[in-house]
Amino acid sequence: MTTLVATNLSKQYPTRGEPLRILHDLDLELSAGENVAIVGPSGSGKSTLLHILGTLDTPSSGSILFDGENPFTMDEQTLADFRNKNIGFIFQEHHLLPQLSVFENVLVPTLASGKPTAADIERAEDLIERVGLTDRSHHRPAELSGGERERVAVARALINKPLLLLADEPTGNLDHENAQQIGELLLDIQRQEQMILVVVTHSQELSQKLDQQLELSAGQLTPLAK
Ligand code: ADP
Ligand code: MG
């Protein structure tokens, strides 16, 4: 079973005076099928933590083991392949490619390993259906609403069947109804596919739908009473 184990993670930035400590000996352990909401005030380091868990940024000290393997010891190309295969990202600036259709955007992460296979195409069609965009499949991002673009980002993050899905305020720019739908969609897919899901959110409504709630404060994660 897939596990993600972060131990003693610290992240600090040098300043002219005392270093700015963002994460401080933070521990987190998650297994396949688990989902967790991370909450905390703006500037508390939530995005920093997601970037480190997603291997897009490195900790100042501490380690991450993904199925017992430390991604930070990999060379750049191995790490890029590892990330592309195992980790899905849903960030608020979803960077859909404006010249590509919904269908093509969803397939982008499969291009790293060459041409999309027949199975990739089938999964893209299936995911687009699950996020409710079949009749928008040939539209470009500019022709979609904010909620629809977010759905494309969800489908794209899932195309390679990641073991770890990271979402940074996925509903932050959406109205209440769209936010609810995206939240439920993420959880449905996470439960079906038994991946690990980490969601940073300001929405209490969304965080309470997840199985665990943790608060990031003073650089550490502590359970939040439901
Ligand atoms: P959150 O997502 O919880 O709002 P972030 O992880 O984005 O917080 O940022 C945490 C803190 O780290 C902020 O105070 C931010 O200013 C600081 N920070 C982020 N990146 C850098 C950097 N490259 N250099 C210095 N400080 C940074
Ligand atoms: Mg943030």
Image (cartoon, rainbow, N blue to C red):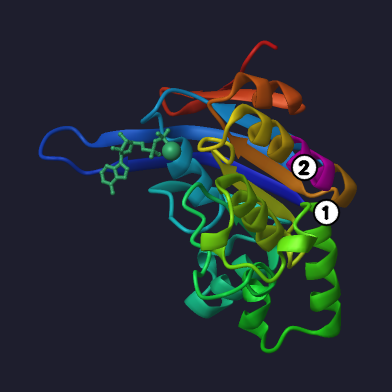
Q: Is residue 95 left or right of residue 33?
A: left
Residue at image x 64%, y 51%? 148
Q: Is residue 91 left or right of residue 60?
A: right
Q: Residue furthest bottom?
A: 115
Q: Is residue 136 above or below residue 208?
A: below
Residue under label 2, please give it: 185
Mark 2 or mark 1: whose residue is earlier in sequence = 1
Point out the quarter of the image occupied by ligand 2: top left
Of the pair 24 and 206, the residue shown nearer to us: 206
Q: Secondary structure at mark 1?
A: helix
Q: Which kind of residue does numbered mark 2 sit on?
A: Leu
Q: Secondary structure at mark 2?
A: helix
Which disc number belongs to residue 130?
1
The percent coordinates of residue 59 (x first, y second) are 43, 49
Of the pair 123 and 141, the residue shown nearer to us: 141
The percent coordinates of residue 5 (x first, y second) are 66, 45
> Is residue 71 on the magenta stretch?
no
Q: Residues within 10 Å of mark 1 (few under 14, many from 20)?
A: some
Q: How far is disc 2 from disc 1 in space, using C-alphas? A: 8 Å
Quarter holding the C terminus is: top right
